[in-house]
Image (cartoon, rainbow, N blue to C red):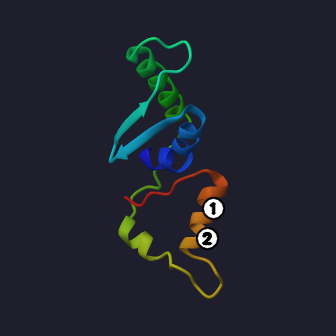
Amino acid sequence: LAQWLQAFWIASQERKNDVSFNLEGSCLQLEGGLAPGETSAAEFEQRWRKLISTALKKIEVEDLGDMDSAELRAAIPEEDAGGKGMPDLLALEQSLSVKVAFC
Protein backbone atom coordinates (compact mmCIF):
# COMPACT_ATOMS: atom_id res chain seq x y z
CA LEU A 1 0.00 0.00 0.00
CA ALA A 2 2.78 2.37 0.94
CA GLN A 3 4.56 1.71 -2.37
CA TRP A 4 1.42 2.60 -4.33
CA LEU A 5 0.90 5.80 -2.34
CA GLN A 6 4.53 6.77 -2.96
CA ALA A 7 4.37 5.97 -6.67
CA PHE A 8 0.97 7.43 -7.60
CA TRP A 9 -0.56 9.62 -4.89
CA ILE A 10 1.86 11.48 -2.61
CA ALA A 11 3.55 13.73 -5.20
CA SER A 12 0.25 15.05 -6.54
CA GLN A 13 -1.04 15.75 -3.02
CA GLU A 14 2.17 17.60 -2.14
CA ARG A 15 1.78 19.82 -5.24
CA LYS A 16 -1.95 20.45 -4.77
CA ASN A 17 -1.92 21.10 -1.03
CA ASP A 18 1.52 22.58 -0.23
CA VAL A 19 2.33 19.79 2.22
CA SER A 20 5.19 17.34 2.49
CA PHE A 21 5.07 13.65 3.23
CA ASN A 22 7.74 11.47 4.75
CA LEU A 23 7.21 7.76 4.27
CA GLU A 24 9.37 5.42 6.34
CA GLY A 25 8.29 1.79 6.09
CA SER A 26 4.58 1.86 6.84
CA CYS A 27 4.72 5.15 8.80
CA LEU A 28 3.48 8.22 6.94
CA GLN A 29 4.33 11.66 8.34
CA LEU A 30 2.65 14.78 6.99
CA GLU A 31 3.74 18.39 7.45
CA GLY A 32 1.98 21.49 6.20
CA GLY A 33 -0.15 24.45 7.06
CA LEU A 34 -3.84 24.60 7.73
CA ALA A 35 -6.16 24.83 4.74
CA PRO A 36 -8.48 27.82 4.40
CA GLY A 37 -11.28 27.41 6.92
CA GLU A 38 -9.32 25.09 9.22
CA THR A 39 -8.70 26.49 12.67
CA SER A 40 -6.85 23.70 14.45
CA ALA A 41 -4.38 20.88 14.07
CA ALA A 42 -7.23 18.48 14.86
CA GLU A 43 -9.16 19.66 11.78
CA PHE A 44 -6.00 19.33 9.67
CA GLU A 45 -5.47 15.79 10.94
CA GLN A 46 -9.10 14.82 10.40
CA ARG A 47 -9.07 16.12 6.80
CA TRP A 48 -5.89 14.24 5.95
CA ARG A 49 -7.02 11.02 7.62
CA LYS A 50 -10.09 11.13 5.39
CA LEU A 51 -8.09 11.88 2.22
CA ILE A 52 -5.59 9.08 2.92
CA SER A 53 -8.35 6.64 3.82
CA THR A 54 -10.15 7.45 0.57
CA ALA A 55 -6.94 6.87 -1.42
CA LEU A 56 -6.29 3.55 0.33
CA LYS A 57 -9.83 2.32 -0.45
CA LYS A 58 -9.01 2.58 -4.15
CA ILE A 59 -6.16 0.08 -3.83
CA GLU A 60 -6.85 -3.52 -4.71
CA VAL A 61 -4.35 -6.07 -3.46
CA GLU A 62 -4.18 -9.25 -5.47
CA ASP A 63 -2.35 -12.27 -4.09
CA LEU A 64 -1.04 -14.48 -6.87
CA GLY A 65 -0.93 -17.52 -4.63
CA ASP A 66 1.83 -19.67 -3.26
CA MET A 67 4.89 -18.53 -5.22
CA ASP A 68 8.54 -18.03 -4.38
CA SER A 69 8.90 -14.27 -4.78
CA ALA A 70 12.71 -14.36 -5.01
CA GLU A 71 12.54 -17.00 -7.74
CA LEU A 72 9.82 -15.11 -9.60
CA ARG A 73 11.76 -11.83 -9.47
CA ALA A 74 14.95 -13.59 -10.61
CA ALA A 75 13.06 -14.95 -13.63
CA ILE A 76 12.46 -11.40 -14.92
CA PRO A 77 15.61 -10.24 -16.72
CA GLU A 78 16.87 -6.69 -16.30
CA GLU A 79 16.62 -6.53 -20.09
CA ASP A 80 16.71 -9.10 -22.86
CA ALA A 81 17.47 -8.87 -26.58
CA GLY A 82 13.82 -8.04 -27.30
CA GLY A 83 13.80 -5.07 -24.93
CA LYS A 84 11.58 -6.86 -22.46
CA GLY A 85 12.21 -7.47 -18.80
CA MET A 86 12.21 -5.16 -15.81
CA PRO A 87 11.98 -1.89 -17.81
CA ASP A 88 8.89 -3.31 -19.52
CA LEU A 89 7.35 -4.19 -16.14
CA LEU A 90 8.08 -0.70 -14.80
CA ALA A 91 6.48 0.89 -17.89
CA LEU A 92 3.39 -1.28 -17.38
CA GLU A 93 3.19 -0.21 -13.74
CA GLN A 94 3.14 3.44 -14.77
CA SER A 95 0.65 3.05 -17.60
CA LEU A 96 -1.76 0.96 -15.50
CA SER A 97 -1.19 2.81 -12.19
CA VAL A 98 -0.30 -0.45 -10.49
CA LYS A 99 2.59 -1.42 -8.24
CA VAL A 100 4.09 -4.90 -8.37
CA ALA A 101 5.63 -6.06 -5.09
CA PHE A 102 7.71 -9.21 -4.75
CA CYS A 103 7.32 -10.30 -1.13
For mark 2, give the secondary structure: helix
Spot occupied by residue 34 in the image (x, y as percentages of width and height): 48, 21
Q: Name the residue under label 1.
A: 92
The crowd level at tag 1 (other Cα within 10 Å; few <14, some 14-19, many 20+) is some
Three-letter amino acid code at the position of disc 2: Asp
Residue visible at 39% across and 18% down?
A: 41
Which numbered disc covers residue 61? Answer: none
Spot occupied by residue 62 in the image (x, y as percentages of width and height): 50, 48
The crowd level at tag 2 (other Cα within 10 Å; few <14, some 14-19, many 20+) is few
Residue visible at 48% across and 48% down?
A: 6
For mark 1, give the secondary structure: helix
Work out whether residue 68 can be spotted.
no
Q: Name the residue under label 2.
A: 88
The quarter of the picture where the C terminus appears is bottom left
Residue visible at 52% across and 54% down?
A: 99
The quarter of the picture where the N terminus appears is top left
